[in-house]
Image (cartoon, grey):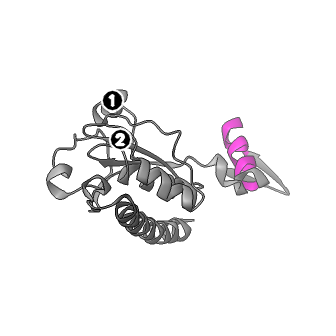
Amino acid sequence: MPVASSHRVRFASADAFETSLLFSSSLWQDRSLIMKQKILFICVHNSARSQMAEAFLNEICGDDFEAHSAGLEPGRLNPLAVEAMREIGIDISHKQTQSTFDVFKSAELFAYVITVCDESSAERCPIFPVVANRLHWSFPDPAALSGTREECLAGTRKIRDQIRARIEMWCDKMCAVETTRA
């Protein structure tokens, strides 16, 4: 804390001085220096819903959050999800699926763990250490869609748009909370 002494300001320590410089400098205005909250999206196979949610959060709120995804029983990336995302300019084709157990073993800390599968599958998710918030957003599984390829793609687009709308709504709420704290 600065201590006023005539017209000069003295700092109790070098650390206090450096902190003062950081907060008063233009560096503080660069949000990339602020630690992002980590979010983990989980679904059954990490093949569509959680991958789309991860991509949308990183796209829409990437300045504030760092999204990851995992699956209870990781499979292969759903090609219809890849195509549906590519149609709107987001490429997830390079993504790999991963297991929630592997994420759990890594001891990575997440501010939120958000399940995007059905309720019974969500109950199978491991308890992550130091998770501040656990949320559940239910979306249909694109892998369960039936019909022609075009019908399945249309269904996947609908799920994609539902996920995007939910992420946008959540980002609006969460960024408003961050703004009021500042």
Q: Position of residue 53 (x, y in %)?
A: 42, 56
Q: Amino acid at mark 2?
A: Ala
Q: Are marks 1 and 2 in contact (CB under 8 Å)?
A: yes
Residue at position x 36%, y 54% in the image: 49
Magenta: main secondary structure: helix
Residue at position x 31%, y 33% in the image: 104
Q: Amino acid at mark 1?
A: Asp
Label 1 Cα neighbours within 10 Å, binned few <14 / some 14-19 / many ≥20: few
Q: Quadrant of residue 19?
A: top right
Say which residue label 1 marks: 102
Q: Position of residue 21 (x, y in %)?
A: 75, 48
- Classify the position of the C terminus by image quarter: bottom right
| Label 1: element kind | helix
Q: Is residue 5 left or right of residue 153?
A: right
- In front of the other: 175 or 170: 170
| Label 2: element kind | strand
The residues bearing labels 1 and 2 have C-alpha atoms spaced at a distance of 9 Å
Count of numbered labels shown in the rendering: 2
Q: Is residue 45 left or right of residue 33?
A: left
- In front of the other: 55 or 87: 87
Q: First in sequence: mark 1 or mark 2?
A: 2
Taking 177 as reference, is 69 above or below it? above
The span shown in magenta is: 11-24
Q: Is residue 54 visible?
A: no
Q: Is residue 14 visible?
A: yes
Residue at position x 21%, y 44% in the image: 125
Say which residue label 2 marks: 70
Quick one: which residue is furthest to the right in this view?
A: 7
Q: Is residue 18 magenta?
A: yes
Label 2 Cα neighbours within 10 Å, binned few <14 / some 14-19 / many ≥20: many
Q: Quadrant of residue 74?
A: top left
Q: Is residue 173 magenta?
A: no
